[in-house]
Amino acid sequence: MGTTLKTIIEHWQYIAPIVKRPENEKDYETLVNHLDTLLDLVGDDDRHPLAGLVDILSDQISAYEAEHYPPPVAMGIAALRFLMDEHGLTQSDFKQEIGSQGVVSEILNGHRKLNLTHIKKLAERFHLSPETFID
């Protein structure tokens, strides 16, 4: 066993609470406060000895946020989903307005955005304002 590992094992009780993924809001807030403190020390210095710890805490915070605070669904996409349900439409029904079923799928899953041409054609098809499909 190397010296570094021995040192980590000896100090793990102090390190573990800081580097583990938050389990609740209190843990999350604590981790965010630790990260803020570290960022004050490290700044933009990627070579700072604590830069790796900043990365670890950032990853843990991001993972918690992704699980507990999913990004809001874009309003234009929500409107399109609603209209699809209302009219019994499938992804394949939008070849004229959007393109292939694959493109529609990417848009509905948030991997692509509706462009201006899509928005205009969808507004025309459903007799709605283009603003309905703009986020």
Image (spheres, rainbow, N blue to C red):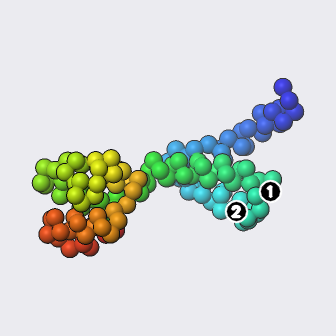
Is 56 in front, or is 12? 56
Is 52 in front, or is 83? 83
| Residue found 56% across the figure and 52% down from its top | 61
Give the position of the C terminus as an image quadrant.
bottom left
Left/right placement of residue 4 relative to residue 89 reads: right
Q: Is residue 135 positioned above or below 107 on the image?
A: below
Q: Residues within 10 Å of mark 2 (few under 14, many from 20)?
A: some
Say the numbered circle drawn on residue 39. 2
Amino acid on which disc 2 is placed: Leu
Percent of width and height locating residue 118: 29, 64
Percent of width and height locating residue 5: 81, 33
Write down the residue under mark 1. Answer: 47
What SS does tag 2 mark? helix
Q: Is residue 27 visible?
A: no
| Residue found 67% across the figure and 51% down from its top | 55
Left/right placement of residue 124 relative to residue 69 reads: left
Residue at mark 1 to residue at mark 2: CA–CA distance? 13 Å
| Residue found 22% across the figure and 47% down from its top | 92
Percent of width and height locating residue 86: 13, 55
Amino acid on which disc 1 is placed: Arg
Say the numbered circle drawn on residue 127. none
Q: Which circle, 1 or 2, is nearer the viewer?
A: 1
